[in-house]
Image (cartoon, rainbow, N blue to C red):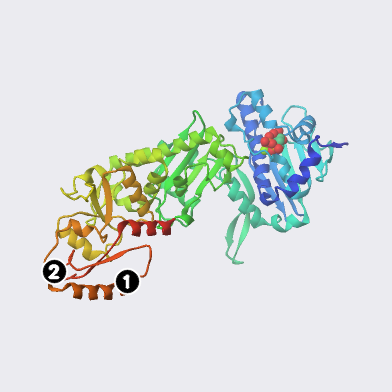
Amino acid sequence: MQTGKIGVTTENIFPIIKKFLYSDHEIFLRELVSNAVDATTKIKVLSSLGDYKGELGDQTIHVKLDEEAKTLTISDHGVGMTADEVEKYINQIAFSGAEEFMSKHKLDAQNIIGHFGLGFFSAFMVAEKVEIVTKSYKEGSQAVHWECDGSPDYTLQDSNRETFGTDIVLHFTSEDAEIFANKTKIEELLKKYCSFLPVAIAFGKEQEWDKDNKKYVDTDKDKIINDTKPLWKIAPSEITKELYDEFYHKLYPMAEEPLFHIHLNVDYPFNLTGVLYFPKLKNSFEFQKNKIQLYCNQVFVTDSVEGIVPEFLTLLNGVIDSPDIPLNVSRSYLQSDQNVKKISNHITKKVADRLAELFKSDRTEYEKKWDDLKIFIQYGVISNEKFGERAAEFTLLKNTDDYYYTFEQYSDLIKDGQTDKNGKLVILYTNDTIAQHSFIEKAKTKGYDVLVMDSPIESHFISFLEHKNENWTFKRIDADVVEKLVEKEESLAMALTIEQQETLRQVFTAALPKEKEVIYNVEFAALAAEEAPVVVTQNEFMRRMRDMSKTG
Ligand code: ADP
Ligand code: MG
């Protein structure tokens, strides 16, 4: 038996692993299972290159929990390690074995997961003792047994293991055992991090209904927890709409049908695959953000993609998989990383392309989806310049008769002389067709078109449009300038003296909400007709400022 001390930096690293990284301690499972996947991928590659000539056998990775003994074992049939390799790859922490392996075999980075940094030693976040029983695939290798209790001292001795591959055995600390020596917990973590890993992972047994005892019982069939060829890794030409929808429901079991999807597939100048979905957006933002899952070579990393994709894209759902996103760095670093910028621009472009294509190929269908898409597109237009430029061709305006127009088409609907005193085109809109019904009807009988602009960020969107198009000004249908567009009529005002008007004005003003931000006007001679002898209007600018401060 050999004993020794782990590489020089270790004495400092253990306390760090234990204390500071503790908040994320569940990632130990992701790290160990991805190492098992790496080792399995390596032997497959060696076999395909002819460097390994033997049988590969069943490559399923087995995760076994012994709740009583409080141990978790991860077994693979991968390349295994010789005593020297354990010495090198395990004992010398800072050494990245994957890196060396890749340069030796000139493999593409995407085949090996080596991006997480902490790796194998994350096992010590939850275990008081870790054992490795391993045998290298290399001919004539002696199997070895490594053991370490979390101090820098380890032991290494021969083992009688016969098949190549590796078993990692964790002995949970009593504290961690309470959380992790639990079948449900381990299954939950495997589902979270390993659902789409490329090698089959077995945990527990398939169950079946036992009629006699009226309960589910284990069969002797291993339960495979992952889908080794997830949808985003399959060529789009081979995927039907049903499969896209099915995958969506696998990711978000409670969600409604998505509107449509975008399949991402890039290998140059960065590697990116994924499937994004447009969900039906509800009228409130916050709870809808951050549903995209980020993967690195099919290993789940995070579902918070802020800083990686532009803000408005965080409203989309789906999966992004890229080994080119640096994962163990801070978010502020991510924002300045060139690769991340390129990836983010690419996704933005793809999203715009897809919308343009949908709009062009089937406008009727696109219009049907518009009300659900609107908030996303408006948000994109306001917050992302590149997207905004592209979106001009597929952003729609809907009027009170449910007709949809592009900006270009809508300009034709604005009447001659529908201008304010500065000569700007006045565009009339409503955000509440019921409350503002009489205003709308009046404007329509006068031949003016009225848009429905009612998304929660509409005030921001409108102000953005006015900023972009200096010649436009938007006025809500109850704004105090609208009456100037509509010819004055014979009305109640004529029948009232100035004093009577003043008295009546006071009655109405007293009944109006007391908001210092908004100025209300009580008019008797404006839009007034028999059915609406008195009209209350509001100052457009002040009202909009108030609305914007509410939506933030
Ligand atoms: P990384 O995976 O980034 O290389 P790790 O700390 O996770 O870093 O693992 C260190 C090295 O230990 C690996 O590169 C690999 O050489 C070796 N190793 C870890 N687990 C296994 C395993 N299950 N089978 C074979 N080698 C392994
Ligand atoms: Mg690793």
| Residue 24, x across and y down, in percent | 66, 49
Residue highlighted by disc 2: 491
Which label number is shown at residue 61?
none
Tell whether 309 sits left or right of 75: left
Closest to the observer: 42 or 400?
400
Residue highlighted by disc 1: 512
| Residue 159, x across and y down, in percent | 82, 38
Q: Does any atom of ligand 2 lie closer than 8 Å to the CB of label 1? A: no
| Residue 321, x across and y down, in percent | 53, 39
Closest to the observer: 330 or 419?
419
Query: What amino acid does circle 1 point to?
Result: Leu
Q: Residue at x 38, y 54 (%)?
A: 457
Q: Residues within 10 Å of mark 1 (few under 14, many from 20)?
A: few
| Residue 214, x across and y down, in percent | 59, 67
Q: Quadrant of ligand 1?
A: top right
Whether residue 6 is visible, yes or no, is yes
Element on which disc 2 rests:
loop
Quarter of the image with the N terminus in it: top right
Q: Residue at x 29, y 72 (%)?
A: 509
Rendered position, 366 above or below 433: above
Q: Residues within 10 Å of mark 2 (few under 14, many from 20)?
A: some
Quick one: which residue is furthest to the front in this view?
Answer: 499
Whether residue 164 is visible, yes or no, is no
Element on which disc 1 rests:
loop
